[in-house]
Image (cartoon, rainbow, N blue to C red):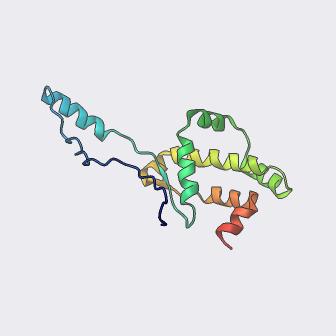
Amino acid sequence: LQDGTLMMMIGSGGAVPCPPSAKRPTENAEDDEMEAEASKTIEMPVGLKNLGNTCYMNATLQCLKAIPELREALSKYSGSLPDVTSAVASGDGGSKAVTVAVRDLYRMMDDERAKSHGSVVPLVMIQVIHFSVVEVATLLYP
């Protein structure tokens, strides 16, 4: 830092407020029981296994999965991976291949067997991205 440099500070100059207490007063014990039961039934989404440098891709895919309109559009998409892969090899269809891979990955994440394991390995998704976007493959694995 040099003399006369303008610095912007973020935050407040006052004391840090205490967090609210974890237990709030309730009217009766039934409210506590209902709240405890509701917290037990929360279904956690299936995650994606990190395969080296895939954490940002995984986070992006999981975030996009929460968009209902995207999920609906993907479920209506009728392409298949073998058809699209041959199109990519001929220089056309990279975006279609990624669309099919994302759709199939989301289907795998919604499968009951995946829910019992807690995660899905996005291997096909990575292969499709490497195949259709060569720059990604060379950046990740020089």
Q: Is residue 29 above or below residue 105?
A: above
- Give the camera-side residue of 98 and 76: 98
Residue at 19% of width from left, 29% of height from top?
Answer: 31
10 left or right of 56 in image:
left
Q: Residue furthest top?
A: 27
Residue 123, x across and y down, in percent: 61, 60
- Residue positioned most to the front: 4
Q: Residue lying furthest right in this view?
A: 90
Q: At x 69% / y 57%, what residue is drawn?
A: 129
Residue at (18% x, 33% y) in the render: 32
- The residue closer to the viewer here, 47 or 6, is 6
Residue 104 in the figure: left or right of residue 16: right
Rendered image quadrant of residue 33: top left
* Number of marks present in the image shown: 0
Report the side of 101 relative to 41 (left or right): right
Residue in view at x 49 percent, y 66 percent: 2
| Residue 62 coordinates in the image, percent (x, y) | 53, 48
Quick one: 18 or 85, which is closer to the camera?
Answer: 18
Is residue 47 shown above or below 138?
above
Residue 98 in picture, x, y percent from top left: 70, 50
Point out the image quarter for the C terminus: bottom right
98 above or below 137?
Answer: above
**Residue that protrudes farthest toward the left in the picture:** 28
